[in-house]
Image: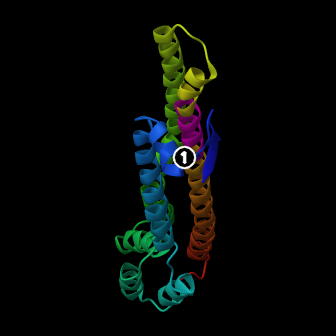
Amino acid sequence: MLFLQTNNAAQALTLWDLILKGGPILIPIAILLIIAIYLFIERWLAIIGLAKTPKGLTDYVKKALVAGELKQATQYCESQEGALPMILYSGLKSMSAGSKIDEVEKSMESMANIAFTRITNPLSILGLISGVAPMLGFVGTILGVIRIFYNISLSDNISIGIIAGGLYEKMITSFAGLVVGILAYSAYHFLQYLVDKQALKIEMETHDFLTFLREPTKI
């Protein structure tokens, strides 16, 4: 609880009082905060799903191909969740159609791009929020300054009380916008880091698989 000193006595000012004094500009800032939190949780769960890979998947597929069980390997990858099974499935389907190694590689690359684009596209909204929220806070600052000069023009008197009334809105909205912007910015880069980490792992697995296909004794 905060305490503001008035001319007569100390007046308690709660967090809710501060929010109310922030003005209507806090409403869109609060909405952006809710959207940012939702996107962070939803994308985090999506990245966890992207990372789901059965242990030894690539080794299983290679052994199945050596044994001439292309169909079985294809069906196994199709039944699994995660980006790697999806990418391997795309390559195996291309092999089933009689495609060459280069065409198989292109098919896998295309599927990898699709899988990661689905994950990363919504992250741009977090980037947008990280820029818009502070700007909305700045709008609140301008509105606060306008309010100060408007009150001064009405009273024809410059006093601390009149100036402080407008500064409430100015400082609260700027603070709220910056906080939401920092949270959205941090969430964006944290999720991007997780995506890049998974992308590196999957790239290593697919490279290992493609290297296996190019070996003279591959199948």
Give, as a single range, the part of the protein colored magenta: 169-179
Residue 38 percent across, percent down from the top left: 43, 59
Instruction: Please say if 71 is above or below 166.
Output: below
Residue 214 percent across, percent down from the top left: 59, 72
Q: Is residue 31 left or right of residue 135?
A: left
Is 105 in front, or is 44? 44
Residue 86 percent across, percent down from the top left: 42, 71
Q: How many marks?
A: 1
Residue 143 in sight: yes
Residue 172 highlighted magenta (yes or no):
yes
Instruction: Please say if 16 is above or below 42.
Output: above
Instruction: Please say if 73 is above or below 91.
Output: below
Res 42 → quadrant: bottom left
Instruction: Please say if 180 is above or below 156.
Output: below
Q: Is residue 81 left or right of residue 196?
A: left
Res 210 → quadrant: bottom right
* Residues packed near mark 1 inside 10 Å, few (<14), some (14 to 19) or many (20 plus): many
Q: What kind of residue is marked 1?
A: Val
Please report the residue visible at 60 percent of the width from the left and 77 percent of the height from the top: 212
**Label 1, on which residue?**
180
Residue 216 highlighted magenta (yes or no):
no
Is 142 in front, or is 21? 21
Quadrant holding the N terminus:
bottom right
Please report the residue visible at 48 percent of the width from the left and 23 percent of the height from the top: 143
**Magenta span: chief secondary structure:** helix
- SS at badge 1: helix
Please report the residue visible at 57 percent of the width from the left and 55 percent of the height from the top: 187
Residue 124 in sight: no
